[in-house]
Amino acid sequence: MERMKRIPEPMLEIADLSVRFAGKQVLESVNLDLYPGELVMAIGPSGSGKTTLLRAVNRLNEAYPHCNTRGQVRIRLADRWWDIYAPSTPLAELRLRVGMVFQHPNPLPFSIYKNVALPLRISLGMNPKETLLRVQRALEAVQLWSEVKDRLHDSALTLSGGQQQRLCLARVLALEPALLLLDEPTASLDFKATRHIEALFQTLKQRYPILAVTHNPGQMRRLADRVMVLQDGRCVAAMSRPEIEDPEHSRRVMEAFF
Amino acid sequence: MRPTANRRTSDLATTIFCWTAAVLTMLAVLAVMGFLLYRGAGTLGPNLFFGETHWWEAVRGVRPVFDGLWSALAGTALLVLLSCLLAVPTGIAGGIYLSEYGSRRFRAVAGFAVDLMAGIPSIVMGLFGFSLIVVLRHTFVPRAKTGLLLAAVCIALLVLPYLVRTTQNALAGLPSHLRLLGPSLGFTPWQNIRHVLLPSAGRGILSGVILAMGRAAEDTAVILLTGAVAQAFLPRSLYDKFEALPFRIYYMAAEHRTAAELDQAFGTALVLLMLTGTLFGLAFAAQRTMEKRWKG
Ligand SMILES: Nc1ncnc2c1ncn2[C@@H]1O[C@H](COP(=O)(O)OP(=O)(O)O)[C@@H](O)[C@H]1O
Ligand SMILES: [Mg+2]
């Protein structure tokens, strides 16, 4: 027990990851370990490969044509390591355990309830009674339940941007993932909604290891336990929490690469 | 100064052109409907449908209808139903395959084939059906003859390309954030199509179905060669000859001797319009019901 605590095992290991789209190098030799209880943030300007990095973890890059991925991504589920790119790895099951929140809120054009319930029914095969409970718990976890409990069957598109993004987060949390991928989840939200969601992430990182990306240094300072700086698909710098908190140091790093 | 003025003029010209086009379309539709109503509305009534026969006996098919369009109405309704039953599932499945599964190369080749097929004139499709029967008669099925089923198959082939293309385009037009969502939630490709993509593309697919139904209801050239006859009876089986509304309109207009007879043809055309209108309504209602169930 004592030893486990001193040297915790990571949840996610990215080793020498390179991604190319139609011959264009988008990520080059990226390495990253993600440990339980921490929120690691990749920061970089637009086009630096942040979204591609996240999509490499749940193999969504393959949905696009001419994608070539090399290197290794491994995830630890129930004390067993899975190589995400091994042909024998069950892809759909794996994606279930890796919850992803996208840059723009993307609710399905269905009701609020169905947005959260559909994956439970389809991917987990849950019965209606269990589903109802899970949906409520997930909506409570993102503090949306009190706002929508009387209009669960309204279209999800009637929600505000911030509410939609929390709904998308609830949809992912309901599946009880092993880790979270957040792709600039507040990029299209106003100040208040952003702070609300950031506060949620602060509590969520106790339960889920989180790999997030942002192009916003302020958000990085507020949320990140560790930072890697991406530029043109390469990891060009890293910062630990004390370095992030040191305004001089983090300013120098940011200025050097932005 | 000048470029701005130029831009404003061209903007104005485009607006006026589009507005005129829209209004002309509406006027054309209204003119056709108005003319049909003017000539045909007077003939609408039980007599146009059932002639001298009692309506209940006609509907049950126990007695022939000699001077009414009932057998033609029933024949066309059966034909549309049957051909859509064949073409709609096949066409939608083909569209799904082309949009979601086919490789780039296959998509190009098959897409070209679909476009070619869409360009086949309906008289050629009728000829195809007719020669099919001739071939069958000399080979496996000596007693093969033209009839409802053959006509439905040929009509289905005629409308298939529309269904394939509209389904493919409706799916391909969906934004990529919707496309990636299902997989990110652990859906298999088919689950993603079934539960996310198809419901989102429902309206577009519906427009293809409506186009197909309209085409199936109005086509005359195909059925002329594959089993439509002027007859007072309802078809008794899938292999039976049948009468159809567009065919009836054609021979009534071609062979009329009095203005009253020609008005009957206009009345029949009105009935055909009402039939297709009803079918569109049904398709729309079916789509709305499914949408409601999907979105619930
Ligand atoms: N599906 C794709 N096909 C081709 N190029 C892509 C694709 N996705 C991303 N890219 C390219 O990879 C680079 C990084 O993209 P992305 O990961 O979206 O950056 P970020 O999220 O940091 O803005 C961009 O130059 C982009 O053009
Ligand atoms: Mg991005």
Image (cartoon, rainbow, N blue to C red):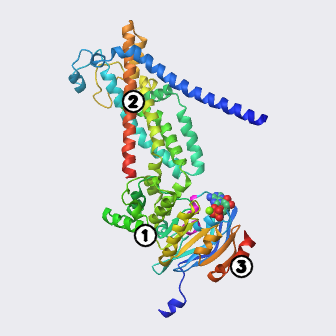
Q: Position of residue B177 (x, y in %)?
A: 54, 56
Near-viewer residue (A158 or A117): A158
Camera-near label (3 vs 2) is 3
Q: Quadrant of ligand 1?
A: bottom right
Residue marked by disc 1: A141
> Outermost residue, bottom direction?
A2
> Outermost residue, front direction?
A192
Report, in whole angstroms, how far the alpha carbon at label 1 lies from the one at label 3: 36 Å
B141 relative to B169 in the view: left or right? left
Residue marked by disc 2: B277
Label 1 element class:
helix
Report, in whole angstroms, how far the alpha carbon at label 3 lies from the one at label 2: 73 Å
A252 relative to B49 in the view: left or right? right
> Outermost residue, right direction?
B2
Tell me if residue A107 comes above or below residue B77 in the rendering: below
Residue A129's quadrant in the figure?
A: bottom left
Residues drawn in magenta:
A55-63
Disc 1 crowd, CA 10 A, few/some/many (<14, 14-19, 20+) = some
> Is residue B206 found inside the magenta-colored segment of the image?
no
Label 2 near label 3: C-beta < 8 Å?
no
Near-viewer residue (B47 or A85): B47
Residue marked by disc 3: A248
Near-viewer residue (A85 or A117): A117
Amino acid type of the residue that numbered disc 2 sits on in the rendered structure: Gly
Amino acid type of the residue that numbered disc 1 sits on in the rendered structure: Ala
Which secondary structure is most common in the magenta stretch? helix
On the question of residue B147 being in view, the answer is: no
Q: Are marks 1 and 2 on the same chain?
A: no
Near-viewer residue (B170 or B6): B6
| Chain of the residue under label 2 | B
